Image: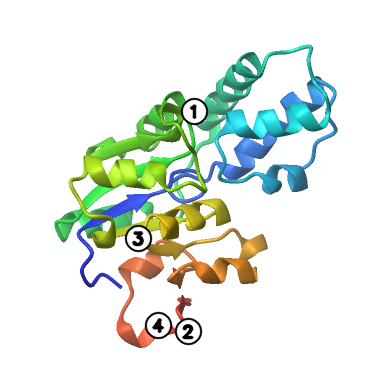
Amino acid sequence: MLTDIKAVIFDMDGVLIDSEPLWRQAMINRFVKIGIPFSEAHCRLTTGLRFKEVAAFWFKKHDIKHIHIEDFEKEVINDLCELITQKGKSMKGVTEVLYFFKQKGFKMGIGTSSNLKLMNTVLDVLDIRQYFDALSSAELLEYGKPHPYVFLNCANKLSAMPDNCLVIEDSLNGIIAGKAARMKVVAIPEDINKNNPKFAIADYQCDSLLDIVNFNSSELSNNVIHHD
């Protein structure tokens, strides 16, 4: 898996931090408050997009005009940051995989659709900032995922060629972005997407970050890693 790889770019939500349930909680609460019927299924339809794009999609669909998207985004992000501060926990294998890549001398970065406030909250709550050589938030870029810009921007900050980068993602939009950037992609999907055929576009599929640490060539079959 690591042949020719010199840099590793992590998605953040659902890869480093178990924030997807908290995202859904914050989104459902706020969307319902402004009159949009919302459920976990609705949340999953736009996983991987920048939240402003998520809000714009649902505002247009329900013709919401009594609140500005920018104000709504701030409310949701503030709620989410509070939830992460109170309940945030790392995904399985985060400490081990960060130490693993650090010991091997790989450069590491984050390429996320989340905004800077949320990214900084996660880095501080998990106390992992010291592992990363570059941070890239799609908030500051012209395009978000599934466009490859956020990963290409991170690779540039890492002084790494795209062909030498490994992306670790949990969402389909993120996987598409990584492949569009000409990078190798490891998918670690939520349980609900474990058997989703669309995730087959990733180069590898793992159950958790620990699979990467414990990986050896005999465990690779049909580009899917399964580790008990």
Whichever of callouts 3 and 2 sits on the residue coming sooner in the sequence is 3
Three-letter amino acid code at the position of disc 2: Asn
Q: Is residue 219 above or below residue 23?
A: below
User: Circle 2 sits on which residue?
Assistant: 222
Give the crowd class for mark 3: few <14, some 14-19, many >=20 residues within 10 Å.
many
Q: Position of residue 226 (x, y in %)?
A: 48, 77
Camera-side mark, 4 or 2: 2
Residue 186: image location, x then y, percent? 42, 64
Q: Residue at x 78, y 15 (%)?
A: 65
Give the residue displayed 43% in from the left and 60% down from the top: 179
The mark nearer the N terminus, 2 or 1, is 1
Q: Mark 4–mark 2 contact, CB under 8 Å?
A: no
Look at the image and tell me whether residue 145 can be seen: yes
Q: Which residue is mark 4?
A: 220
- Quadrant of the image containing the N terminus: bottom left
Question: In the image, residue 209 lies at what x, y percent?
Answer: 40, 61
Asked if residue 26 can be seen in this view, the reply is no
Q: Residues within 10 Å of mark 1 (few under 14, many from 20)?
A: some
Real-space Cα separation, disc 1 to disc 3, in angstroms: 32 Å
Image depth: mark 3 or mark 2 in front? 3
Q: Amino acid at mark 3?
A: Met
* Mark found first going from the N terminus, 4 or 3: 3
Mark 4–mark 3 CB contact (< 8 Å): no
The residues bearing labels 4 and 2 have C-alpha atoms spaced at a distance of 7 Å
Mark 1, secondary structure of its residue: helix
Which mark, by number, is residue 183?
3
Q: Marks 3 and 2, Cα distance to the nearest angstrom?
A: 19 Å
Judged by depth in the image, the label closer to the viewer, 4 or 3, is 3
Q: Residues within 10 Å of mark 2 (few under 14, many from 20)?
A: few
